[in-house]
Amino acid sequence: MLIQGLQKLTLLDFPGRVACTVFLGGCDFRCPFCHNSSLIAGGEAVMDDEALLQFLKKRQGLLDGVAFTGGEPLLRRDLAPLLREIRALGFAVKMDTNGNHPDVLKALVGEGLIDYVAMDIKNSPEKYAETIGLETFDTAAVAESLAFLKTGVVDYELRTTAVAEYHTDEDFRAMAKWIEGAKRYFIQCYTERDSVLCGGLTAPSAEDLNRWCEIVRPFVGEAAVRGAATE
């Protein structure tokens, strides 16, 4: 899993932190609405681990967090040594994940290497395969990651990228029951970009987004819409 991108400063990707974002290539999903489709198959590295650590050493006192995204960062099985070095430099770590690698997630959290997890809930279990671009998919691993996060051992959020062609009221009712008891849940509005895997998809209306949020709200501690007007 190569480092295929670095956003040197973000105030949005890591809640409560001034951070940089590290993009790791490779993913086991093929979501048609993925904004980082160039990372799915992996590719050439823009830097190695040592170059990232040197960058972070120069940003000590300026940044206080490092957010890992992809692709799917937890596909990188040797991630722990890099995270240990990052933590030794005094940075907090956020991990984005599709939830399909609970053993890796549990191990990294158990070692105290992750401070915040953002996990995708792509759709209702019945529509998962379609939504992630696969013919079939067993949601058991995602359910295991979800159950682990709901124990509260690490701070976290759940999030769904809402796409008009893939999501309905019924889907959000099913998701609400699935994630019941979760601490924090966000609906992120799909945005058309040249970088998405499949063109021609559309964003839900603000009315739809707000209705879906209200469907989920009674089941979770906090629910909100991101990335669209809420009027």
Image: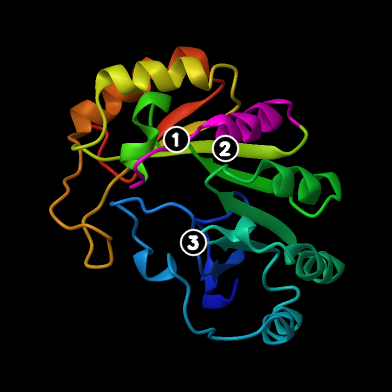
Q: For the residues labelled 2 and 1, say whether their Cβ atoms are less than 8 Å apart.
A: yes
Where residue 71 is drawn, which disc sits there? Answer: 3
Q: Nearer the viewer, residue 45 or 185?
A: 45
**Range drawn in magenta:** 133-152
Q: Position of residue 130 (x, y in %)?
A: 31, 38
> Real-space Cα distance between discs 3 and 2?
18 Å
How many residues crowd around disc 2 within 10 Å: few (fewer than 14), some, or many (20 or more)? many
What residue type is disc 1 on? Answer: Phe
Q: Is residue 33 above or below residue 78?
A: above
What residue type is disc 2 on? Answer: Glu
> Real-space Cα distance between discs 2 and 1?
7 Å
Q: Is residue 51 above or below residue 202?
A: below
Residue in the image at 39% along x and 34% along y: 128
Q: Position of residue 218 (x, y in %)?
A: 47, 12
How many residues crowd around disc 3 within 10 Å: few (fewer than 14), some, or many (20 or more)? many
**Mark 1 residue element:** strand
Left or right relative to 81: residue 222: left
Residue in the image at 74% along x and 80% along y: 53
**Mark 3 residue element:** loop
**Mark 2 residue element:** strand
Residue in the image at 36% along x and 45% along y: 134
Identify the residue under disc 2.
157
Q: For the residues labelled 3 and 2, say whether their Cβ atoms are less than 8 Å apart.
A: no
What residue type is disc 3 on? Answer: Gly
Would you say residue 107 sits in the magenta stretch? no
Identify the residue under disc 1.
186
